[in-house]
């Protein structure tokens, strides 16, 4: 290499290494910036997650505060509306209070649900259940509304659908009730069909499709796109004409996703809508249902089980007692945890219904104390709580409680729980008018 060439070469290499150094510096600055923004993102995410949890806890507490008084309003208004000593006008007032308070309660429940789903606090509780029976129950609960509108209401069951599946019937009921309720609500002529089908024969996993078809107002293609978003209704006239909050489908979608399934809509405006759910559930042998059937609240009759109702709020105790006594249960009451522990020692109870939040000795402490006593390991203790978050039920279970009765307590949920945990379950009596009289003249 000539001298000139060598200098040129050296000059070029130092140029290259300068450039490289500059590139490296740029790269390092870039990486430092990236690391910084990554950390900021992480921090923001942690903050956002904490905010969601705080919001969900706030809402859970708020809904508890709202549900406790609503519990009494719904329960007593229902009893009052059935009382025999009301004149027509006052009965109408009681019915309006009942339906308005139930609507308010549905809204409070929806808000609690969506905030629990947001906080990932909803857990499924899979058990063996009958899907055909669940669909029948859902359809039965909207049949009155369908009758009033002169609509046909039909179930179509594919031959392959098994009798016993393993899944969360409470949440599936919630989803299907919302879909069937919407179908009836948005249909004024024709009817609603709930079609269930399975892709495989019963025996192992079944890929199930549950389609709710109506001949109602339909949804435009534009509106279909956003129908699963929360607080979304097809158009602004819907709320004034049909009411509702626009939360039902958002909750349904989240629940179906939690079950590993899919939900979708096919609709033609002016002709009708099909909302379908597809999910895969293990299909059990029908014999597995036997236990469940034994607990069927409508079949068994008569009970003289001894029940201890523990609640610091007089009205709550009175309501439970008023519902149980006419069914033959022998009801005693305790106003707090300490009193409950003493009562259990001598009362020979078959079951304890225990409020969780009480001053001084709360339901959890009382349960732990009872479990620590000799001979009370198997006494059914049922938590009564308005806080429906999964983690709260976990705490109850850890304290030794057997099951959980969400407030507000309704005759059906209460009787179902009683028949599940005591022998010889009573019949569910539609007419609870007698119950109110036992409260000592509150019907006057
Ligand atoms: P809500 O019924 O409480 O308003 P949803 O989330 O269940 O809330 O439904 C959202 C909207 O979707 C409804 O307001 C309505 O506009 C539309 N929609 C749902 N189901 C149907 C249906 N079967 N037919 C027509 N429109 C429906």
Image (cartoon, grey):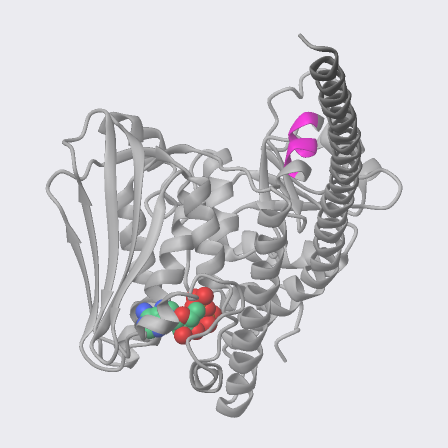
Which residues lie in the magenta part? 393-398
Ligand 1 found in image quarter: bottom left
Left or right of residue 411, residue 146 in this image: left
Q: Quadrant of the N terminus?
A: top right
In this image, 1 relative to 428: left or right?
right
Residue at 38% in and 45% down: 301
Residue 160: % across, % down: 13, 38
- Residue lying at the far right of the rendered structure: 360
**Can I make out residue 260 in this image?**
yes
Closer to us: 393 or 412: 393
Closer to the camera, 159 or 148? 159
Q: Quadrant of the C terminus?
A: bottom right
Looking at the image, which residue is at 62% across and 39% down? 390
Q: Is 223 or 34 nearer to us in this picture?
A: 34
Question: At which x and y percent is residue 399?
Answer: 71, 27
Towards the viewer: 223 or 355: 223
Residue at 46% from the left image edge and 74% from the top image edge: 233
Residue 400 is situated, as x and y percent measured from the top left of the image, at 67, 26
């Amino acid at each position: 290499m000539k001298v000139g060439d060598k200098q040129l070469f050296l000059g070029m290499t130092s140029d290259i290494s300068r450039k490289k150094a500059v590139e490296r510096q740029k790269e390092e600055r870039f990486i430092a910036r990236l690391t910084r923004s990554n950390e900021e993102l992480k921090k923001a995410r942690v903050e956002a997650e904490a905010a969601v949890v705080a919001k969900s806890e706030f809402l859970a507490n708020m809904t508890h505060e709202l549900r406790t008084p609503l519990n009494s309003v719904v329960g007593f208004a229902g009893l009052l509306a059935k009382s025999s000593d009301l004149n027509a006008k006052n009965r109408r007032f009681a019915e309006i209070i009942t339906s308005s308070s139930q609507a308010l309660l549905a809204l409070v429940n929806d808000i609690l649900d969506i905030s629990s789903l947001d906080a990932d606090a909803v857990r499924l509780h899979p058990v063996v259940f009958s899907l055909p029976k669940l669909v029948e129950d859902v359809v039965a609960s909207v049949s009155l509304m369908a009758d009033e509108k002169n609509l046909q209401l039909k179930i179509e069951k594919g031959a392959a659908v098994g009798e016993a599946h393993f899944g969360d019937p409470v949440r599936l009921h919630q989803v299907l009730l919302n879909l069937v309720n919407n179908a009836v609500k948005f249909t004024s002529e024709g009817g609603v069909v709930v079609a269930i089908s399975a892709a495989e024969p019963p025996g192992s996993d079944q890929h199930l499709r549950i389609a709710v078809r109506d001949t109602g107002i339909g949804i435009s293609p534009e509106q279909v796109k956003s129908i699963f978003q929360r607080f979304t209704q097809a158009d602004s006239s819907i709320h004034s004409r049909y009411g509702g909050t626009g939360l039902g489908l958002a909750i349904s979608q989240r629940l179906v996703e939690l079950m590993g399934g899919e939900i979708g809509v096919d609709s033609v405006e002016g002709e009708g809508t099909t909302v379908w759910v597809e999910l895969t559930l293990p299909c059990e042998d029908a014999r597995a249902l036997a236990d469940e059937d034994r607990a069927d609240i409508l079949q068994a009759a008569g009970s003289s089980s001894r029940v201890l109702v523990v609640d610091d709020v007089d009205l709550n105790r009175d309501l439970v007692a008023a519902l149980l006594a006419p069914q033959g249960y022998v009801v005693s009451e305790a106003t707090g945890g300490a009193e409950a522990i003493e009562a259990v020692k001598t009362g020979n109870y078959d079951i304890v219904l225990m409020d969780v939040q009480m001053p001084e000795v709360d339901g959890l402490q009382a349960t732990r104390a009872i479990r620590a006593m000799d001979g009370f390991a198997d006494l059914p203790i049922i938590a009564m709580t308005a806080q429906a978050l999964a983690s709260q039920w976990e705490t109850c279970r850890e304290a030794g409680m057997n099951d959980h009765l969400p407030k507000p307590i309704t005759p059906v949920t209460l009787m179902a729980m009683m028949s599940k945990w005591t022998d010889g379950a009573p019949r569910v009596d539609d007419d609870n008018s007698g119950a109110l009289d036992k409260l000592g003249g509150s019907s006057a």
